Amino acid sequence: MHSVDEYSNNVRNMAYARIMDTGKKTSGWKEIIVEARRFSVVPAGCGVDVAMSTSSGSVGALFVPWQVHETRSRTHAAAQEEGKMVSKKPKTESKDQEKGQHVPSKNKKSAEEESPTKSKKLKAEESEPNGKSAVVKEFTEFCKALGEHLSVEEMRKILQANEQDASGPEDAVVSRCEDMMFYGPLEECPVCGSQVEFKGWKYKCTGIYTEWAQCTFSTNNPSRKSGPIEIPDDIKDDYVRKWVKQHEGKKFPKREIDEEGHIFSGMMIALSGRMSRTHGYFKEQIMKHGGKVNNSVLGVTCVVASPGERSQGGSGGFAEALERGTPVVSEDWILDSIEKKKAQPLAAYDIASDVVPEGRGLPLGKLDPSEEAIETIAAEVKLAGKRSVHKDSKLDKDGGSIFEKDGIIYNCAFAVCDIGCEMNQYCIMQLIMVPENRLHLYYKKGPIGHDQMAEERVEDFGSRVNDAIEEFVPFLRWLLEMSSSHGKGKRSLRRRDIGIDVRHGGLALRQMGAAALHCKLDPSVSFLMKQLCGQEIYRYALMEMAQDLPDLPIGMLTDLHLKRAEEMLLEWRQNVESVPESGPAADAFWTEMSNKWFSLFPTTRPYTMRGFEQIADNVASGLETVRDINDASHLIGDVFGSTLDDPLSECYTKLGCSINPVAEDSEDYKMILKYLEKTYEPVKVVDVVYGVSLERIYAVESKAFPPHEKIKNLPNKVLLWCGTRSSNLLRHMHKGFLPAVCHLPVPGYMFGKAIVCSDAAAEAARYGFTAVDRPEGYLVLAVASLGEEITEVTSTPGAEEAEGFEEKKMGVKGVGRKTTDESEHFTWRDGVKVPCGKLVPSMNKNGPLEYNEYAVFDPKQVSICFLVGVKYEEQNMEVVDE
């Protein structure tokens, strides 16, 4: 999905720099278009779905004027949240003095009048607050003198002469020049080759690793060039030339950096009410780490108070902070910031926003995961598909519909993630037609998971259709160019991708009873269809992945988007082999990969993924789950409105599948029950052990997989367990099993593009187990033909070996550390072997698999036979009478 927008104060590319060269921050679509080179796109509309990057040059050509009259905006709230981006700036001179930097004077003094001397009192209080060394004092005096003798333009020339970055605002140029002349010219970033710069009490790279990721390289001891400082001939200042001459041939000093001493640098903090320790203690800690303490709430960064202040009514400072909208945080903010050596986000320690009218609240990503789940699991889906009017626009209540013209649906949604600069945002833009032909443009952007900080605009264009489209043109043109580059026609793009997110279109909990009452299917089959057509299992699946965002239709993506995600995964798999295990290059690679993925599949909790296990668990498995949920969305459609038309029977018909309950007294039921009991081992979740009980069994036949009549003629047939989320079942029955998306050297993906099953119900239960509070799930029993030749492996196959298995379509058995007792195996009907037996240790004690796994590479050799409904029950818990 896709996205947007103004992210950070860093100037990260030439096109962006052209807008920022005045030192003022622009707003609106200009920034968005420039940064579109980094977006993955899954329009909720426009009939296209793009996940590509473009050069800044091609995007720069898309600039158009953007003027929107804001009728509803939370810009002020956003300004408060972003703090330094929009807060008033102090006078340049005093700000620079605090940082040990000085504004250059236009009136130069001669070298005789201003020779370097040591000051008795340093004004740069925050530069090196504790125990300033002689080098630090000398640097402070040098900065003062340099500012009086050189203009900013002269400093730019000196930087250029020494192959340093001379661009950017004046304060950045002054800081670079001071550092370079005193400590020596910096070498380029070893990761991306860009400029390294002193920021936030650390040397950090200012460049971008790729168009998807800002370079994350940082160090306290950067490499510097040897040799003298070069001064251009047209700079005649005697002081500068004399200073360079005096230090020629000498070794540059090393910059002393005290990270802990600057944790609260630039912050004014107020203390309020009775706290767990004395105010004097917290004041000492704040000042020791670079901050200042103010007795008044006026103008402070935040107010620190004890959580008990709320229950006690709050002190005067607490109440005043609420009135002024000043953040009020707990004492833990100070303690955690010192422990982690970095000022922590204020929002994560907020103790008062929920009591403020229209308070900003906490972003979902800062809540405890269990609290976030409660917030999102039942949240209304605000954007459910390409023809869905966003709920926050309020225009759906006026009968509004997404505007269409010439086969184009004017509805777009984007998201962008850049972990390096802590960016995780989204944007939505729609043209909405309301009755009487009044066209509106709706625009919303903001941090993912923090709706209170989103900015919204609605503009009424009336009958001025062309004017409205002109505002939409930059995005529209870019999307159409991207879609045409894939060789797709406009009609083919639209036909498949129109649908409703199952989180909106599926049955709500309150509708399930009525839907089952009107259903003409067998009651037991109706029970299954009610589960598969309801919103609940899909909401839970996305919630577990922290991707259940109400503003973005993650359950209704286009085929092109999913295809692009798979291509991206395969590209990573190929490139990861050449990435070192650690170091700056590894950090940059994994950051870029994570940025790409979380831009394609937004989450409230993006993080830097590392290693094959996280790729398997979050990328490969996540892609398969989202793909299957999207298939369910298309199949179910929109049954939310009415249950009188028997939507369960309608969905059952579209499924193209025959489902029949298996009687408890039948031989098949008894066989499956025995197979389950013999090959299951309890699942342990934290301190609770869960057993399993059999609830129901369904026999399944579908046109999507080969019928039993064909399977029975194939060699080496085995009845095996397959684990799956309940949210994936509709897709399996509708289209059959699909092979894994790629090879990864971890269980589940170690065989490459194969369908993987097991002879142990315990293995399948790992995938079918849902959660402690939702103990019901389904296991799948399928007949798989392993072919004429079966290859056994005891270790993890390499990529080339897995490709060989796939090319030969051979059956592969991965021997686990536990296996089923072969003496108990038996043959079911038509020569199908059932490896039912007690789980016992195998000879492969050090293998990567705990249980045996079987890989089949041809979907025509696997046929689903049974759905086994199970319930996970606590085994080691007992009721204690009080």
Image (cartoon, helix red, strand yellow):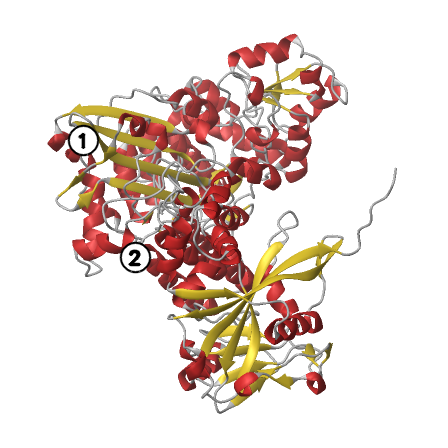
Give the number of marks: 2
Quadrant hosting residue 160: top left
Question: Distance of mark 1 from mark 2, alpha carbons?
Answer: 30 Å
Callout 1 secondary element: loop
Callout 2 secondary element: helix
Residue 455 x %, y %: 37, 27
What amino acid does circle 1 point to? Pro
Residue 562 x %, y %: 36, 57
Q: Residues within 10 Å of mark 2 (few under 14, many from 20)?
A: many
Residue 150 x %, y %: 36, 28
Q: Quadrant of the C terminus?
A: top right
What amino acid does circle 2 point to? Leu
Image point (82%, 49%), residue name: 878
**Closer to viewer: mark 1 or mark 2:** 2
Residue 687's place in the image compared with 714, above or below, is: above
Left or right, 419 with reference to 337 = left
Tag on residue 560?
Answer: 2
Left or right, 41 with reference to 858 = left
Left or right, 329 with reference to 467 = right
Is residue 832 visible in the rendered image? The answer is: no
Residue 188 x %, y %: 42, 51
**In the displayed image of the protein, which residue is found farthest to the right?**
882
Q: Nearer the viewer, residue 866 or 392?
A: 866
Residue hosting label 1? 65
Q: Residues within 10 Å of mark 1 (few under 14, many from 20)?
A: few
Quadrant hosting residue 65: top left
